[in-house]
Image (cartoon, rainbow, N blue to C red):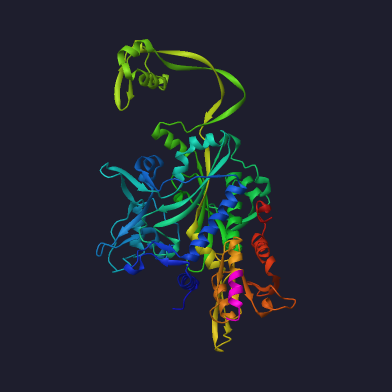
């Protein structure tokens, strides 16, 4: 079978140092890849562009949290109970598979309800789905939790997990972050980091990994303000390709109309969909191969009340999710507040403080002191936190202090009404989350940038396939290839000086003096280098081209002659302007 684009991209990626299969000398392991020198540089450039979009432009803050997380966090978030995929095993060889993927692969054209194991069992029987390895009969479908478990600390037996997403660290830090932002909403926080999911059967290369890279933003806002966005007016006229859950059909829709008609739930969701589109195009995804698909009710994550996936079109895999933009409402902060007993609220401030009356359980300290001695203050605090509606007047009350249940006699407290001035009312913020799968975006950029054509080799005269990655200059791992025309007569020394000056100006370069200049151009085209500089005899001569170099553009193949002293400034200007397109904030490339 002829190699498709996926195979060709991976051949280039492995040969040129973008991606390597992990643990290859030991037979490899499904769901893991190493980033080689060029891949690591490309990944870093994409991360830096994300910072430019979300930190510099949007004003988000960046934090970094541990990957290992105590079990209590994921019990509260719902991941322990609900972060599962439907799994089925072969009753003969024991091989495991994603049940919904098997059903879809058997030609089922409907939507598989992954929450209904009985329905999936029926579909497997109806479509005569058997083991892909031995052809054996499949057992019943069940749900498999995808988190990697571990223990925190030797001998402590405290259970933990490798995080399946970076979001929870941000939610747990909300009280600190709220103070950092001077207790004003909305504000956003981003985090880069590794996520870990023990995927059942990762057979799609970079599309489905067990250890992967995420770029997530959590935007905290006040639901009373309608989940608007202060800059929504800038994108209301933007047209995006949407696939609403109500129709399942692609349609081009103005974002203002999509919000007005209720297709997109609120302005904040719509704004970050527009921002996501701009980011993906800046990375190098083909605008004609991007769409936004709304989650069906049967596939919605347990924490979301609406979600749109930004998907890219892959030659092999069809439409693939690479970003999820979810309205997580107040689910996470509410869950962690309930589980930890910590305050996760914000304050909606009044124009002027108001005097309000409220009923409290008031501790009588002169009674509690002799009774509870060193624990008296803790008992008093526990009483003050009780809901008066749950306390029977003139009856003993039981409170919990450090895991110990203590009984407080009726004379140790009283129910009373107090008047106090309050600055505002407490509420739990809602969250809009754009969550980016970095590995998928990087692969999509490579696939959409890949081009090839046949040309006659200047040395052999034979036809050869020339490959080119049209990566945007902003994210290309190498910005400039530097070549001496030939490897003698002082040209290499001058070229190395040019190479060093460019690198010291902050421009990543690759020096190459092997083979013909045509071969060197081809090698740089194949890794996406946007510019190549050649030092020739005119550079060293005494004529009008002394101390000038030839600069070749990867995409147009046009060449210009520039003075060496102007080269770094010219390249830096090109890098800032490369890939300019309509954006939410056009000043990004200014």
For residue 473, side relative to residue 333 (left or right): right
Residue drawn at x 65%, y 42% is: 230
State which region is magenta: 488-497
Extreme-bottom residue of the structure: 461
User: In the image shown, does 522 or 352 lie closer to the viewer?
Assistant: 522
Residue 183 in picture, x, y percent from top left: 56, 33
Residue 102 in picture, x, y percent from top left: 37, 62
Extreme-right residue of the structure: 544
* Residue 530 seen in the current view: no
Residue 347 vs 507, above or below: the answer is above
Q: Quadrant of the C terminus?
A: bottom right
Residue 118 vs 405, above or below: the answer is below
* Residue 355 seen in the current view: yes
Which quarter of the picture shows residue 533?
Answer: bottom right
Q: Quadrant of the N terminus?
A: bottom left
User: In the image shown, does 53 or 420 lie closer to the viewer?
Assistant: 53
Residue drawn at x 60%, y 21% is: 353
Magenta-colored stretch includes residue 558: no
Residue 156 in picture, x, y percent from top left: 27, 41
User: In the image shown, does 225 or 455 lie closer to the viewer?
Assistant: 455
Residue 135 in picture, x, y percent from top left: 29, 69
């Amino acid at each position: 079978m002829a190699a498709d684009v996926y195979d060709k991209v991976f051949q280039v990626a492995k040969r040129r140092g973008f991606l390597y299969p992990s643990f290859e000398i030991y037979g490899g392991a499904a769901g893991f890849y190493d980033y080689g020198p060029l891949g690591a540089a490309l990944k870093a450039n994409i991360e830096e562009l994300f910072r430019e979009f979300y930190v510099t432009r949007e004003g988000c803050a960046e934090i970094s949290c541990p990957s290992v997380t105590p079990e209590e966090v994921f019990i509260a978030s719902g991941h322990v109970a609900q972060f599962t995929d439907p799994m089925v095993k072969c009753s003969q060889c024991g091989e495991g598979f994603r049940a919904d993927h098997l059903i879809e692969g058997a030609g089922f054209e409907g939507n598989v309800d992954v929450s209904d194991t009985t329905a999936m069992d029926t579909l497997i029987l109806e479509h005569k789905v058997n083991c892909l390895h031995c052809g054996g009969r499949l057992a019943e479908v069940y749900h498999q939790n995808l988190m990697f478990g571990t223990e925190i600390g030797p001998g402590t037996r405290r259970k933990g997990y490798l995080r399946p997403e970076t979001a929870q660290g941000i939610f747990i830090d909300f009280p600190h972050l709220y103070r950092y932002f001077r207790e004003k909403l909305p504000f956003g926080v981003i985090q880069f980091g590794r996520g870990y999911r023990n995927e059942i059967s990762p057979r799609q290369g970079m599309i489905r990994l067990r250890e992967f890279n995420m770029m997530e933003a959590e935007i905290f806002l006040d639901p009373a303000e309608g989940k608007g966005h202060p800059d929504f007016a800038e994108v209301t006229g933007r047209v995006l390709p949407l696939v609403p859950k109500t129709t399942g059909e692609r349609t081009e829709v103005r974002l203002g109309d999509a919000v007005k008609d209720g297709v997109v739930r609120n302005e904040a969701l719509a704004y970050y969909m527009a921002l996501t589109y701009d980011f993906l195009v800046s990375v190098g995804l083909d605008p004609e191969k991007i769409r936004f698909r709304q989650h069906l009710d049967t596939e919605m994550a347990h924490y979301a009340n609406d979600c749109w996936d930004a998907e890219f079109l892959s030659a092999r895999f069809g439409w693939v999710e690479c970003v999820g933009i979810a309205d997580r409402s107040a689910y996470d902060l509410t869950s962690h507040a309930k589980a930890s007993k910590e305050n996760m609220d914000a304050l909606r401030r009044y124009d002027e403080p108001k005097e309000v009356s409220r009923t409290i359980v008031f501790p009588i300290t002169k009674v509690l002191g002799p009774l509870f001695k060193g624990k008296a203050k803790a008992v008093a605090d526990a009483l003050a936190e009780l809901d008066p509606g749950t306390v029977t007047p003139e009856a003993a009350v039981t409170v919990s202090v450090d895991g110990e249940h203590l009984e407080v006699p009726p004379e140790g407290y009283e129910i009373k009404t107090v008047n106090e001035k309050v600055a505002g009312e407490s509420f739990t913020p809602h969250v809009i989350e754009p969550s980016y799968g970095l590995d998928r975006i990087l692969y999509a950029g490579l696939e959409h940038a890949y081009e090839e054509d046949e040309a006659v080799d200047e040395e052999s005269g034979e036809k050869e396939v020339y490959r080119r990655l049209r990566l945007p200059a902003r994210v290309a791992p190498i910005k400039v290839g530097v070549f001496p025309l030939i490897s003698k007569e002082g040209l290499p020394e001058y070229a190395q000086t040019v190479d060093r000056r460019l690198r010291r100006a902050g421009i990543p370069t690759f020096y190459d003096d092997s083979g013909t200049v045509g071969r060197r151009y081809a090698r740089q085209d194949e890794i996406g280098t946007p510019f190549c500089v050649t030092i020739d005899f005119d550079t060293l001569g005494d004529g009008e081209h002394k101390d000038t170099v030839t600069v070749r553009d990867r995409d147009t193949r046009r060449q210009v002659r520039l003075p060496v002293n102007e080269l770094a400034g010219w390249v830096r200007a090109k890098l800032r302007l490369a890939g300019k397109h309509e954006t939410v904030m056009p000043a990004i490339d200014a």
